[in-house]
Amino acid sequence: MARRPVAVVAAIVLFGEAIGMVLINWLLGRVVHQQHMSMGGVDSGTMSTTTYAMGGVFGFYLAACGLILLLTGVRDRAPGRFGRILLVTCAVVHGVLGALTVGLMGWTAFAFMMVVLALIVLVLMMYAPRLPAEPVDAAPSGDGTPPEPAAA
């Protein structure tokens, strides 16, 4: 099956995205720090520090999602509850950011965000837990009436 390669490719894409996010926020923090301008009463030092912090936190978040996907692909086992929740939030973030990037950055950025979203959702669907089959309580009667439900 193609479960393992898809999970590993999704992990590599998220690791690359985490590195890109950290570098972009570091560059934006440097630009804001060099401006020496105030925006709404907030000085440039505070804005650059928060930009660095946001880049680090979001980069860590994407790297953690990538690590969960990598472990999923290497072990060929579904992620646990925490990992699944983290991946679902990552998919939602990519969906929302994809909707925002189409207007701000163009269709190429939107296409990239949708590819990452599709990879994450594909891994979640491929490693979905199997539900047990419903037991048959009673055989249908020959007269066309539905079977009586079993008493609990």
Image: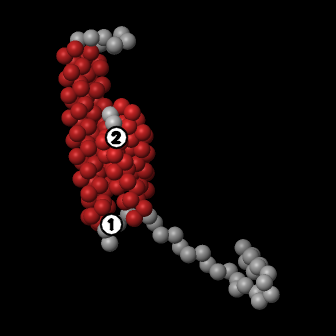
Q: How many marks?
A: 2
Residue 22 seen from this side: yes
The answer for how far apart the CA atoms under marks 1 and 2 are is 28 Å
The percent coordinates of residue 38 (x first, y second) are 30, 11
Residue 142 got which mark?
A: none
From the viewer's perspective, is the residue at label 1 or at label 2 nearer? 2
Q: Amino acid at mark 2?
A: Trp
Name the one closer to the observer, 150 or 89.
89
Image quadrant in which you'd find residue 24: top left
Mark 1 secondary-structure assignment: helix
Quarter of the picture holding the N terminus: bottom left
Residue drawn at point x = 38 percent, y = 54 percent: 118
C-beta proximity under 8 Å, tags 1 and 2: no
The percent coordinates of residue 71 (x first, y second) are 28, 59
Residue 90 seen from this side: no
Q: Which circle's residue, 1 or 2, is located before the other in the chain? A: 1
Q: Which residue is mark 1?
A: 3
Q: Amino acid at mark 1?
A: Arg
Quarter of the picture holding the C terminus: bottom right
Mark 2 secondary-structure assignment: helix
Vertical placement of residue 62 versus 53, above or below: below
Please tell me how crowded label 1 is: few (under 14), some (14-19), or many (20+) other residues with Cα within 10 Å.
some
Q: Which residue is mark 2?
A: 107
Vertical placement of residue 4 versus 64, above or below: below
Residue drawn at point x = 79 percent, y = 81 percent: 145
Vertical placement of residue 106 versus 29, above or below: below
* Residue farthest front in this picture: 107
